[in-house]
Amino acid sequence: MIWDRRMETLDRAGLQELQEARLGWSLGWAKGRVPFYQERLKGWQEGMNPLKVLADLPFTVKADLRENYPLGFLAVPRQEVRRFHASSGTRGNPTVVAYTEHDLVVWAEVVARSLAAAGMKPGQTLHNAYGYGLFTGGLGLHAGAERLGLSVIPASGGSTERQVKLLVDLAPDGLACTPSYALYIAETLSQMGISPNEVSLTTGIFGAEPWSNGMRERLEAGFGIQAVDIYGLSEITGPGVAMECVEGKNGLHVFEDFFLVEVINPQTGEGVEPGIVGEMVLTTLSKEAMPMIRYRTGDLVSVNPEPCPCGRTSVRISRIHGRSDDMLIVRGVNVFPSEVERVILSQEGVSPHYQLVFEGHPSRPDLVVELEEMMPGALDGSGLTRRLTSALGVRLGVRIMAAGQVPRSQGKAVRVVSRIKED
């Protein structure tokens, strides 16, 4: 199902014309209302081609938002703000974002498109197990679901046995949460003696953390569903920036009438060609409260402009390869947790619950993959070590744990932990 067929199937010439007009508005809006952008956009004048100007503008980064905490990027009077969200602030000041009424309408619209791309239809029910509160997931999915015409079970995160009871008793069609929490819900189903056939789910909308096709296969088998990826970040709007369609499952459609996407070499800042992995940069085209110009997301993707079987004409981004700031350096070799997941979940007998643990001496720590086997004796630890070494180019340890020993996630998974003891 395509929610807004006219906009989602707009030809490239028409889309470029629309982007040019909206980008011109966004640059002028930011220059006139946000002190941070006044100096950066001093050369921008109405009548210039904004698409040509954009590539020469400086990037905006998360540190800029933290340095202007809490509301240095606010472009509207405080009384026009209808909602605030914020990051956890685990690395300093939280990133605070604001929304006008118009921004909330746009956000609901792109999430409605996303849910339709996942295969959901008006009249169905969505079990929403994303966290409600300052995190954008819960309220973002909720508003978009209602916009599409779904009924919503606002379960939020946690209380997993209650979640299972609601899934059985209220018979929703779709489940929205992080993929790691979906795994925990599926495991809880099994522990409670409930088979996937006893649950009405047909669709899973999973995001907020990188996940692999191996994880998709586990989730689809665990629930008997079609599982698709949703992408967003609070600095741009929240979930709904891009969405994987159920017909293709081969990249996420960017809603380009609202968000302009670039992919750059993270070291040089220069643009890269389609198909080449780089860091995604996003510019908002209609956001009033806090416009973002060339925001470096830190997410590593490639762009695919080829036609999609679903009929949507927007470019697709690959599923997130990792984050530039989540990259691990193990004895001089770059390692992404998502690549470790790909390797271990391709191995039969591996539970999808795992953690990456740094341990040993601070000057030369080891990285150990702690994982569980599906049945006692099902895993060959030395064989898995060889496969990881071959795929990653560096030797990682493998520690096989008893069932239930790897911590479960009820929100975003904590995949990397440190047990290094300082001298």
Image (spheres, helix red, strand yellow):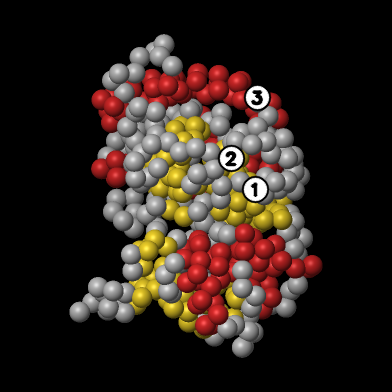
Whole-percent x, y for residue 128 in the image: 61, 54
| 157 up-or-down from 67: above or below | below
Q: Mark 1 points at which residue?
A: 250
Percent position of residue 141, x then y: 58, 47
- Give the residue type at disc 2: Asn
The one of 235 and 301 positioned closer to us in this rendering? 301
Label located before the other in sequence (1 or 3)? 3
CA–CA distance in space, label 1 to label 3: 20 Å
Q: Residues within 10 Å of mark 1 (few under 14, many from 20)?
A: some
Label 3 vs 2, first from the N-terminus: 3
Q: Is residue 195 visible?
A: yes
Q: How crowded is mark 2: few (under 14 residues within 10 Å), some or many (20 or more)?
A: many
Residue at position x 75%, y 63% in the image: 224
Task: Tell me which corner region of the image, top left, top right, bottom left or bottom right, holds residue 155.
Answer: bottom right
- CB contact under 8 Å: marks 2 and 1: yes
Instruction: Tell me which amino acid carries mark 3.
Output: Asp
Depth check: 79 or 59 in front? 59
The x and y percentages for residue 350 are 60, 76
Q: Which residue lies furthest to the left in this view?
A: 423
Instruction: Identify the secondary structure beneath mark 1.
Output: loop
* The quadrant where residue 281 appears: top left
For the N terminus, the quadrant is top right
Within 10 Å of disc 3 (Cα), the crowding (few <14, some 14-19, many 20+) is few
Q: Which of marks 2 and 1 is nearer the N terminus?
A: 1
Element type where label 3 sits in the image: loop
> Which element type, helix, strand or loop, lies under badge 2?
strand
Residue 284, percent from left and from top: 46, 32
Q: Mark 3 points at which residue?
A: 11
Which mark identifies residue 304?
A: 2
State how far apart marks 2 and 1 are (Cα): 9 Å
